[in-house]
Amino acid sequence: MNICLCVKQVPDTNEIRVDPVTHTLVRKGVPSIVNPFDTYAEEVGVRLKEKSGGRLVVISMGPPQAAAAIKSCLAVGADSGYLISSRAFGGSDTLATSYILSKAIKAVEEKEGLKFDLILCGKQATDGDTAQVGPEIAEHLSLPQVTCALDIVEKDGHIQVKREQDTGYDMISVKLPAVVTVVRLPYEPRYPTLKTRTEARKKEISLLTEKDIPSIDVSLCGLKGSPTRVKGTYTPVREKKGVKLMGMDAAKAAGELVRLLSDEKLL
């Protein structure tokens, strides 16, 4: 089974800042990590590869420093990595991003000399929280999709996906090729070893720009190709308002608590 893993390098969630002029995330000088949901998607991919064979190829779209995210994936089981990076892609919203990735996936298939049976993504990125890119890739490629996967089992050209939902689980069978997005798993992703880190550092990451993706329409990329417009951003004001009940026994404190909640119309 040949698997394409789409990952994103995101700002550390404690360090997110928004440019007040462009309304895009400030990434320069901000610590970055591999999107946590993507690490679970990779764990699923590595396990499928170990069971069924084939290749696991990781791709990421972003600035040059996003290569570090790809290196992290190479250190825990991916076979090769591609960085999709160009000024023409900067500022892309989810629709433009998914379009670029869908075209890049086709370009990578040609370069690798294979066809991907499965495309894996994390459910959503922690910087945007849209959960749109994975499903939109499926739409661009005209492939079936399953979101919020907890487990994937491959058999006879199909996959059976255990899908998380609000009231329980769905078991969905899908014919390959397909796109699947992965949620937080009941087990943690594996960690790299010193040996695998060293091996990953030696692997070359291929750079793809619009010149390396012949079928791409640059007018559909970047800020100009993004129909989404952010009109403004702000930091919500958090007001801390509370009452401490001190110097009374439990029964009296409980009665006072009920009165306070009643006065606020919370009971």
Image (spheres, rainbow, N blue to C red):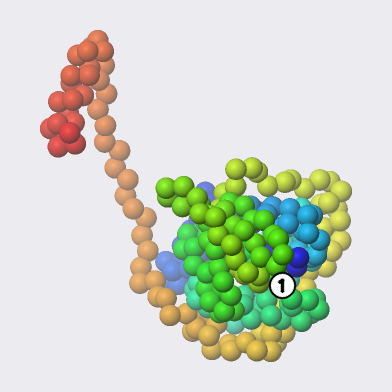
Question: Which image quarter holds the C terminus?
Answer: top left
Q: Position of residue 84 (x, y in %)?
A: 67, 74
Q: Position of residue 117 (x, y in %)?
A: 70, 70
Q: Answer yes or no: is residue 243 visible.
A: yes
Residue 67 position by quadrant: bottom right
Question: Which image quarter holds the N terminus?
Answer: bottom right
| Rendered position, 83 above or below 244 | below
Q: Residue at x 54, y 55 (%)?
A: 171
Identify the residue position indicated by label 1 in the image. Answer: 116
Q: Position of residue 114 (x, y in %)?
A: 78, 76
Q: Position of residue 175 (x, y in %)?
A: 63, 69
Q: Residue at x 83, y 68 (%)?
A: 204
Q: Residue at x 74, y 76 (%)?
A: 115
Spot the residue most to the top. Answer: 249
In this view, the residue in front, 230 or 21, is 230
Residue 79 position by quadrant: bottom right
Horizontal side of residue 233 vs 221, given as left or right: left
In this view, the residue in front, 231 or 123, is 123
Q: Answer yes or no: is residue 83 visible.
A: no
Badge 1: residue crowd in 10 Å (few <14, some 14–19, many ≥20): many
Element type where label 1 sits in the image? loop
Q: Residue at x 46, y 52 (%)?
A: 165
Q: Amino acid at mark 1?
A: Phe
| Rendered position, 109 above or below 11 | below
Count of marks overlaid on the render: 1
In this view, the residue in front, 130 or 134, is 134
